Amino acid sequence: MMMAKKYLLVLAAALVAAAPAHAQRVSLADRVAALEAKANNPQQNLDLLNRLTQQEAELRDLRAQLEQLQNENEQLKQRSRDQYLDLDGRLNRIEGGTPTPAPAGAPVPPPVSSAPAPRPAAPAASIPAERPPTVHGDTGAVAAAGDERTAYNVAFDRLKAGDYADSAALFTSFLELYPTGVYAPNALYWLGESYYVTQNYPLAADQFRALLAQYPTHDKAAGSLLKLGLCEYGLGKLEEAERTLADVIAKYPGTDVARTADDRLKAIQFGRLR
């Protein structure tokens, strides 16, 4: 009797222990069967294929939009460069007219250069025949012109001819001979321009600052402030350039210099966002 009871207890324990494994086998079989049923379901396969096709189409659309944005970005940068060059060219053509005399009693400009400029000979064709230059240095060439207006034109002719080293030397000599002359502000401006076009931004900025300090109401003040901002930009002083260009826009609204400053300011800000 006792042996029978022990046998029954062992059998019951074995059945209890075997139950979880059997349940797991059944659960795994059910999952496999469910997956097989899904795989054999044409509608589900079609839905999956449609979703994949839709995602591929969306990916192609995103790629096309990205390419379009990149093209628009390049076109915007090119338009900004073209507008700047066009406006800067118009500004220079406007400023290339007859110089405006300085107001009476205008202060004497400061020294114009922190480094010696080249000393080429001035071309004889730019000087009246009755007063040919007798010296091949800067001061001699300008002094040989005989009067302030003629001496100024000698330097300005070299600038218009694209001889920027010559024009820098001649404008420097002009300012040494006529520091309080009516063309002194113009000479300061074009001396700065002679340096600017050769990317000598430090010396160019010195001339534009000098003009702004000594002749703040002169016609060349607006252009000087703009060119000062462009010099700062050329020197990599972006924050200073932004402040100066914003000052141009505020002081001279609606003018060519303001529009050029606005274009350059937007280009700088756009560059910061890239």
Image (spheres, helix red, strand yellow):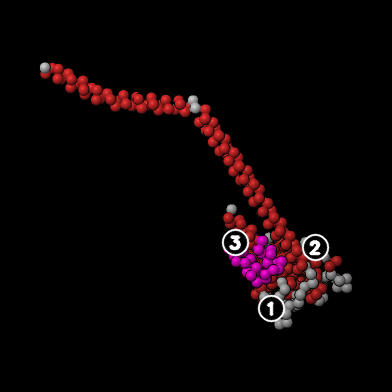
What residue lies at 62% left-to-right and 67% top-to-bottom?
246
Against 191, residue 47 (above or below) is above
Q: Residue at x 18, y 20 (%)?
A: 8
Return the mark for residue 81: none
Residue lying at the far bottom in this picture: please name it. 105
Position in image of residue 216 (x %, y %): 67, 75
Identify the secondary structure beneath mark 2.
Answer: loop
Find disc 3 in the rendering and name its residue.
238
Residue that mark 1 sits on: 108
* Lower position in the chain sequence, tag 3 or tag 1: 1
Can you identify the residue that label 2 sits on? 161
* Viewer-side label of 3, 1: 3
Q: Is residue 136 magenta?
A: no
Q: Name the amino acid type tagged 1.
A: Val
User: Rounded to the nearest whole Å, what is the CA distance between mark 2 and mark 3?
Assistant: 32 Å
Specify the segment rendered in magenta. 234-263
Characterize the local packing of mark 2: few (<14), some (14-19) or many (20 or more) Cα atoms within 10 angstroms.
Answer: few
Q: Is residue 21 left or right of residue 3?
A: right
Tag 3: Cα neighbours inside 10 Å, few (<14), some, or many (≥20)?
some
Residue 91, above or below 272: below
Q: Which circle's residue, 2 or 1, is located before the other in the chain?
A: 1
Q: Is 15 left or right of 55, judged from the image as shown?
A: left
Foreground: 175 or 32? 32
Q: Foreground: 81 or 42?
A: 42
